[in-house]
Image (tube, helix red, strand yellow):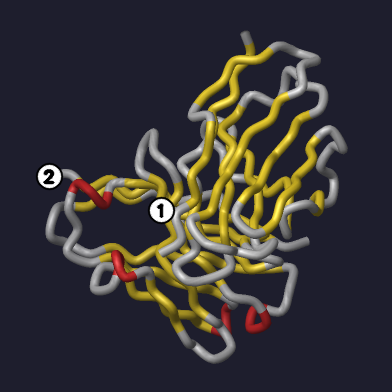
Amino acid sequence: QVQLQQSGAELVKPGSSVKMSCKASGYTFTSYYIYWIKQRPGQGLEWIGRIGPGSGDTNYNEKFKGKATFTVDKSSSTAYMQLSSLTPEDTAVYYCARSAMGIGYWGQGVMVTVSS
Amino acid sequence: NTVMTQSPTSMFTSVGDRVTMSCKASQNVGINVGWYQQKTGQSPKRLIYWASNRDTGVPDRFTGSGSGTDFTLTISNMQAEDPAIYYCLQHNSYPFTFGSGTKLEIK
């Protein structure tokens, strides 16, 4: 079965960066896009962008250009997202998800807290 | 960007009720719409893909309809486990965009 296992919660300082992972299993990693989605506490869902693990091609929501960077490691079927120059507005749960007629499968989310 | 406008923002209902919620797209998105259920502390779970197709294991009381700019999610017989926030998503064009959600609660 398709599974997306994300890394653990992070507490980081303003101005720093954080890199989170999303390990895929149960399917051919390179055949489906990985999406990243942000959800601030008590708020709705925001699409950050996507990466094609086979080609490495990316598409970013304009709002997150310069903030988020997507990479993959095909050898371990893992996708990564790095967030830079963190501010309190980056405090959120970040989900990875897989394409399947839109967004079909979701990871459990990573809570990132930006605080001094 | 395509704006997805959901209504109502919240609603109270009773077990056994028929519930209808709406999602309107600011431009034609075809049938490239999904509906998601998110319970407190959980990841979203997709219920409907391509506007009207039920995901595997989703109870048949959940029905999606619409195309173009107007979409509807209907719960035909509200159950005690259905309170959640429901989101629509358009994946017709980048950036994908979500509606702001409809919070469904039991009276």
The chain holding disc 1 is: A
Picture quarter containing residue A84?
bottom left
Residue A60 at what x, y percent from top left? 38, 73
In terms of depth relative to the viewer, which is nearer, A2 or B81?
B81
Element on which disc 2 rests: loop
Relative vertical location of residue B34 with respect to residue B92 in this rendering, above or below: above
Residue B5 at what x, y percent from top left? 48, 44
Picture quarter containing residue A61?
bottom left
Amino acid tagged 2: Ser
Relative vertical location of residue A52 with respect to residue B27 in this rendering, above or below: below
Q: Please give the name of the residue rendered at 49% of the width and 78% of the height, measured from the top-left corner.
A: A51
Amino acid tagged 1: Lys
In the image, taking residue A36 as reference, residue B81 lies left or right, namely right
Please tell me which of labels 1 and 2 falls first in the chain: 1
Q: Please give the name of the residue rendered at 22% of the width and 48% of the height, measured from the top-left corner.
A: A89
The chain holding disc 2 is: A
Q: Please give the name of the residue rendered at 75% of the width and 45% of the height, measured from the top-left corner.
A: B64
Element on which disc 1 rests: strand
Kindly report the distance in space between the C-alpha atoms of the residues bearing marks 1 and 2. Answer: 21 Å
Q: Which residue is mark 1?
A: A38
In the image, taking residue A50 as reference, residue B11 lies left or right, namely right
Q: Nearer the viewer, mark 1 or mark 2?
A: 1
Q: Which residue of the protein is positioned furthest toward the bottom in this rendering?
A: A55
Q: Residues within 10 Å of mark 1 (few under 14, many from 20)?
A: many
Q: Please give the name of the residue rendered at 48% of the width and 73% of the height, measured from the top-left corner.
A: A50
Looking at the rendering, in which quadrant would you find the C terminus of chain B?
top right
In the image, taking residue B12 as reference, residue B66 lies left or right, namely right
Q: Which residue is mark 2?
A: A116
Relative vertical location of residue B96 with respect to residue A90 in this rendering, above or below: below
Q: Which residue of the protein is positioned furthest toward the top in this rendering?
A: B107
Relative vertical location of residue A89 with respect to residue A71 in this rendering, above or below: above
